Image (cartoon, rainbow, N blue to C red):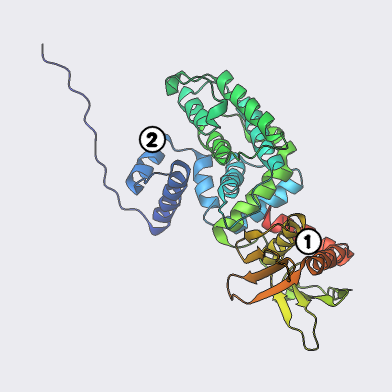
Amino acid sequence: MTPERAPQQQTLSVRISEGLRQRLERARRLVSARTGESVSTSEIAKQFLEGARDDRLELVDLLGDPTGSMVQVRRKGEEGLVLSRAEWTTLAHFVQCGVEAYSPRSPKIVSKESLIAVLDAFVAVYDLRPAVNARLDGYYLGNLPPEFRPPSGKPDDVSPEAVRQTIAQSRRHLTDPGATYVPLMVGRNLYVLLDEDRLPGAEDLTCALHPYWPALWRLGARGHFAVTHKPVRARTSPQDGVYRPPIPSITEGPYTLSFGRGQGQEFSVLLSLPSPRGPLYPIVGYPRVAEFRTMLLDMVADSEPGDWTGAYFYALVSTPTTTEPTEIWFRAHENGIAFGFTVPEWQRLHALFGRAWELAEIRVAWEELEREYGEL
């Protein structure tokens, strides 16, 4: 008897438009970002032909204009409207980017409360699955902390209950005030769940995810900024501007803060340092102002000798001597110009910023900027 021949793989050669090529390239980058492995454009095209879904094509299109799409997602989310599966997946993509946007030069990592919200959001959607997918369950378990996983077995033997139990233990760990482990891979689980698993329609997804909207949005906006270096802000023209009164200056001892308005709710800070002709130190834009405030707080809370490094600033606490007290110095990475303060002077500077952020004009602007930039 002649053995049965395996079906031959057919090769299909087609000419595609530039627009479709760009869509496939965006899809390729998405898969590579999720798996950490290089994927060819032809492989992505094969996946699209074998299992194309309208929502996945919509996702690729949404990511073609990330800022415009996130503006749309934010508007619908804040109004309590139903988001499509592709829109939730777009947000989850940037949530993953936001959770993983951490480095030694980004000292303000994602809060434990936000990580708990990601875990809870995952479970809320996970429980909607109409069928078990052992392959994806193995993937989900692999992205959770190894110390909380059950004894290892075959990846395709992972049960949904093992995934739920590991998530529950990870969540309990994050509620411990002394917990230091940051599960940076949990954002991938929510993204893959929404992108690949079998799920019900948009209304069910929105009902499950809406309770976690505030935290998911903060992380999504953070991830959007990490990827695009832009806030989630609708495009404006000079004709859209409205008059906003100046923000009053505020003084604490020899130090003064002045403020300059920018686009939207943006503002910059000008710090006047003492001496007869003291320098004026500018801090421009939300990301730098936010990090400067974090640096002030961290160095007030811990004035032991050592250093502190952020994306924009570096600070150092000197070791006191028999003749010189402890001093705190800071400088911007971009220019290296350093300024020094005694601990009481630094505390006064911190108090000055604290008073400034009690101003109504600052609070209103800052709340809007936090929604545009996320959890920086």
Q: Is residue 322 left or right of residue 5?
A: right
Estimate the x, y position of residue 220 in percent, counting from the top left: 63, 49
Left or right relative to 294: residue 152: left
Q: Nearer the viewer, residue 340 or 237?
A: 340
Taking the view exactly as shown, the residue that stands out farthest to the left is 1
Residue type, label 2: Glu
Mark number displayed over residue 366: 1
Q: Quadrant of residue 365?
A: bottom right
Vertical position of residue 121 compared to residue 257: above or below: above
Q: In front: 371, or 283?
A: 283
On the image, the x and y values in percent for residue 85 come to 60, 39
Q: Say which amino acid is labelled 1.
A: Trp
Look at mark 2 in the image and give the residue it sits on: 50
Secondary structure beneath dot 1 equals: helix
Compared with 64, 128 (above or below) is above
Looking at the picture, tell me which residue is in the foreground, 356 or 237.
Answer: 356
Q: CA distance from mark 1 to mark 2?
A: 47 Å
Badge 2 crowding class, 10 Å Cα cut-off, few under 14, some 14 to 19, many 20 or more, is: few
Q: Report the quarter where the N terminus lies.
A: top left
